[in-house]
Every structure is written in structure tokens, then in C-alpha cells.
Amino acid sequence: MIKVGIVGYGNLGKGVHSAVENAQDLKLVGIFTRRNVQDIKPIIETKVYSVNELEKFKGKIDVLLLCGGSATDLPNTTINYLKDFNTVDSFDTHAKIPDYYKKLEKVAKANKKLCAISIGWDPGLFSIARELFGAVLPNGNDYTFWGKGVSQGHSDAIRRIEGVIDAVQFTVPIDSAVNRVKKGLNPTLSAGEKHSRECFVAVKDDADKKLIEKQIKQMPNYFADYKTTVNFVSQSEVKKIRGKLPHGGFVIRTGESSEKTKDILEFSLKLDSNPEFTGSVLTAYARAIAKMAKEGFTGVMTVYDIPLKYLSSLTNEELRKRVL
């Protein structure tokens, strides 16, 4: 039985909790939080601890699933957890992944730990699709579209702004761009030509709305390169708009396998709950990290470094017989 711990219990933490409960080979040791332990209400009865108690669990947890945000949380906390535990996280700021990798690699190797970073569906499953499609169809172009759906990372980034009470951000594909790609026209598209961003934000009564809107629209790596609409609404309206946090998207590669022979490859997802699905991906990779750590692997890994067989609870023989 693989023993896991959940660090952070927002939407993603709850999604991970559901996934762990559905996995017969994983056992949840506990939820670890920086908040008041009494304020945490698990969706399924389990023990809740302060993160300050993690030291007591050294050697008792195979993998920690880190469910913090990518804007300010994971970059500052993962390195500390990695000193004592194998970890899996969903760091999703694409432009900063190389630096994040280098920062953690030294710590992981020095402490003989193993961690998987940037695990989810993008980066994550979509990353695999892009690499696979590019390998089998080298003469072509990649296009990735997200949404329409709620981006947890972008919503979290807005909530970090002073004066913001709550926020939800929808990523919206631009239909004209999608249609051009699906017709095989191979257009050159900037990030802002593929998507727009729509934000619903609740703020404190004395907040400077103009300043907050400016901070959102100018935020690098999140909003600066996109047409962004900011709607100020009440906190109750934000909760209503958020719903179950739906999301999805698709990766398309268009190209030629030979002259005048066109191919279009597509991988798509349509999700009722972004955090629940992301939690399911994290949980599968937690299984992989536990198996590989037991075999002696150390360092930092992405989806490109982890063979698919490690994700499954099935044996290699069962995979060949039932899945291949």
C-alpha cells in the first residue's frame, strides 16, 4: 500500500482526496494545512494536521501531493518539503518551469528524494500529446486551445492581489482561430490570437477597482498578452459563476506525412470539474513516484521522464493482456 499525504486543502486538495479514495493501492495518511486545523472540513472523514507536524511523518509517507498555487506558493514551499519527502505538484507557469526544475533538482539529489513537477493536464497530459504528435508527424505545427473553462491557476493569481476577496477566470478559445486550424490552414497565431480571458472579481468595499483591474491586465505570464475583460461582481455571484469549475481543451497538430498527404491529430478533454480531474492526474503520478523512488530513482521529473507503466495500478503483464 502506497502511503500519501495531501498538503493544502482548497479545490485541488479536495480533488486529490477524491482520487486517492478511488485508488485501491493508495492510503491517505492525512491532510496537512497552514490554516487552522479546525477550519478544515474534509469531504471524506480523515485526519487533519498542521504542516508544522510534518516532521513527525518522516519515513511514514511515501509521497506528498502538494496542492498549492503556482503564483506564489509552490515556488517558495516545495523546496522545503522536498528535503524530507518525495513530492508531486501541479506547477503550471509554463515559462518558469525550466528554472523551477533546476532549483529543485539540486535539493532532490542532495537529499536522495524524487519529485514530479508540473503534473496535470496542461502542463501534463497535453505536454505528452504535443511531444507524441510532433515525434510521429515532424513536418507540422502544434496548436493548443484551452476552455471554455475555469483556470485555477489564473483565478488563484487574481485572488493574490490585495483587495480581492474572491475571483474566477474563464479562458475562452477564439472560434475564428480554432476554425482556421481545423481546416488545416496552418496559421501563425500568437497567444492572444488564440484565447481571450474573462474575469469575475469580488473586492473589498474600500478597494481601488481601477488599480486592481490594471494589475490583472498587466500581470505577466497570466494576462498581459491577452484580451482580458474584468467584471466586478459580488462574492455570492463569483461562487455561483464558478459552479463545479468546468474546463477542457484540445491539442491539435496539423501537417503532412508526405507531399500532398495531410494529417490532423487531436487530443481533447471536456471536464465537469477541473480540480477533480487534475487531482486524478496528480494521484496517478504519485503512484508512479512512489514506485520509482522504491527502485532508487532520485531528482526531478516531468511527464517526459516517467514511463506510462508506472502510472497504472496494473502489473506489466496485466497491461499487456488487458490494455495493450
Image: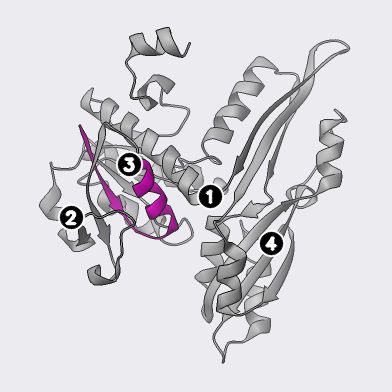
| Residue 188, image quadrant | top right
Residue identified by numbered label 2? 54
- Residue occupying image coordinates x 53% and y 82%: 163
198 lies above or below 232? above
Query: How far apart are labels 2 and 4 at the CA level?
Result: 38 Å
Query: How far apart are labels 4 and 3 at the CA level?
Result: 36 Å
| Residue 169, image quadrant | bottom right
Residue identified by numbered label 4? 224
Which amino acid type corresponds to the residue marked 2 in the rendered image? Answer: Leu
Give the class, few, some or many, for how many residues have Cα within 10 Å of label 2's Cα (few <14, many ≥20): some
Which amino acid type corresponds to the residue marked 4 in the rendered image? Answer: Ala
Which amino acid type corresponds to the residue marked 1 in the rendered image? Answer: Ser
Query: How far apart are labels 2 and 1 at the CA level?
Result: 29 Å
On the picture, is 102 further left or further right than 152? left
- Residue occupying image coordinates x 31% and y 59%: 42
Judging from the image, what secondary structure is the residue with disc 4 in?
loop
Task: Name the N-terminal-most of marks 1 and 3.
Answer: 3
Q: Is residue 187 visible?
A: no
Give the class, few, some or many, for how many residues have Cα within 10 Å of label 3's Cα (few <14, many ≥20): many
114 lies above or below 243? above
Q: Considering depth in this image, is 43 or 78 the residue closer to the camera?
A: 43
Q: Which residues are magenta?
A: 1-20
| Residue 251, image quadrant | top right
Residue identified by numbered label 3? 20
Front tag of 4 and 1: 1
Which amino acid type corresponds to the residue marked 3 in the rendered image? Answer: Val
Residue 239 location (% of width, % of height): 55, 69
On the picture, is 201 further left or further right than 162? right
Residue identified by numbered label 1? 273
